[in-house]
Amino acid sequence: MPAASAHTKPTACLTLADGTVFYGHGFGATGTTVAELCFNTAMTGYQEIMTDPSYAGQVVTFTFPHVGNVGVNPEDDETADPVAAGMVVKWDPTVPSNWRSAEPLTEWLARRGRICIGGIDTRRLTRAIRQQGAPHVALAHDPEGNFDIADLVAKARAFSGLEGLDLAKDVTCAQSYRWDEQRWSWPDGFTKRETPGHRVVAIDFGAKRNILRCLASAGCDVTVLPASATAEEVLALNPEGVFLSNGPGDPAATGEYAVPMIREVLEKDVPVFGICLGHQMLALALGAKTIKMNHGHHGANHPVKDLETGKVEITSMNHGFTVDSQTLPAGVKETHVSLFDGSNCGIRMEDRPVFSVQYHPEASPGPQDSYYLFERFAAAMKARA
């Protein structure tokens, strides 16, 4: 008789607020976490995804089955620690095989306190998310396989969700700092910017490191300020341009304090560039509204059309809220739309160099079709010099 499988007894379970339960194999940290569940369709970059501050308050389902096969390394972190609440995968992570690997994914997740589950039918789970919307879930990992399902369902149902939640304050920097590291390039890796550049103030709503690297590589001297920075603090640095970063949570909640700052900055007629949550913050400051999406956009293969050139870019996306294009005021033009669902993906002011996009032109992970936007921002500052 063959030996019993090591995974005969489930050691983790994912419980949805509607009572649906998925059993699987736990890895990473033990315990329970409660969050919103989303899915990501990227084929690479699981480490960058887990450390993207925009995933605060979310458990990520990876639709691509091979997760963990290249391990992890310090260079690929987008912030100091994983921010996503947990991970759901089809197959358990394998032993890493890559020259850059410094540590297996499972050990990294355990050390960083992230709860994960493998052995899940991620196709079925993804269909459920698409059809029903992003559910509230409780994810539990217990090596002994002891689960109080009724309690986990109650925890999932008690989760307040992301609407009305300001998470930028939880992931932003504690104090200002300078950034001079540029994009990774062979064979030197990350290099430092040494020549003078355009003075840019970056507002950190949950900024990814690779966004800051792209700004530095495009010719910017970057000073990062916390999300709560006032217009006085921003303008005191005499910026040639202001950048609004990505981040998590409900843009309307973060906008309670960020929108007044942005409106004052706009009065000074300096170039402004926003990405993701920064795009939504800019839209709110200009008078538009944002809405919660059914299941959001999370992946590295999203086609976006530039309405002004007709060009289609393949982009990286990560957002659960979107700008309602029907509420854009006069003088603000829609520049990009998603070819998946027609949702807004970019805006610009018609009379000044102020623009933003919903997607992630810095990639990491994802295609680099849209890096030109950083160069456009630098060109706008040069034209104002």
Image (cartoon, rainbow, N blue to C red):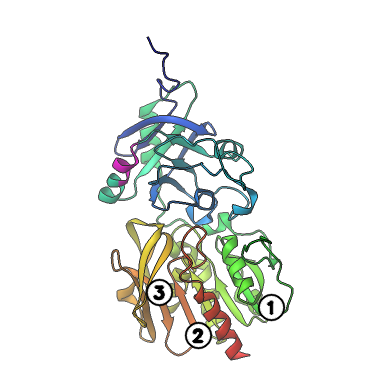
Is mark 2 in CB contact (under 8 Å) with mark 1? no
- What are the residue bounds of the magenta stretch? 121-126
Give 266 or 22, whichever is nearer the viewer.
22
CA separation in Å, label 2 and label 3 = 13 Å
Specify which label sits upstream in the sequence, 2 or 1: 1
Specify which label sits upstream in the sequence, 2 or 3: 3
Give 212 or 152, whichever is nearer the viewer.
212
Specify which label sits upstream in the sequence, 1 or 3: 1
| Residue 328 relative to residue 212: left or right | left
Give 330 or 335, whichever is nearer the viewer.
335
Q: Quadrant of the N terminus?
A: top left
The answer to whether residue 82 is above or below residue 218 is: above
How many tags in the picture? 3
The answer to whether residue 382 is above or below residue 101 is: below
Residue type pointed to by label 3: Gly
Percent across and percent down for residue 193 are 70, 71
Q: Secondary structure at mark 3?
A: strand
Q: Which residue is mark 1?
A: 237
Residue 124: in magenta span: yes
Q: Which mark is residue 346?
A: 3
- In the figure, residue 235 lies in which quadrant? bottom right
Is mark 1 in CB contact (under 8 Å) with mark 3? no
Mark 2 crowd level (few <14, some 14–19, many ≥20, 10 Å Cα): many
Q: Quadrant of the C terminus?
A: bottom right
Percent across and percent down for residue 363 are 50, 63
Q: Which mark is residue 353?
A: 2
- In the figure, residue 292 lies in which quadrant? bottom left
Q: Secondary structure at mark 1?
A: loop
Mark 3 crowd level (few <14, some 14–19, many ≥20, 10 Å Cα): many
CA separation in Å, label 1 and label 3 = 27 Å
Residue 320 visible? The answer is no
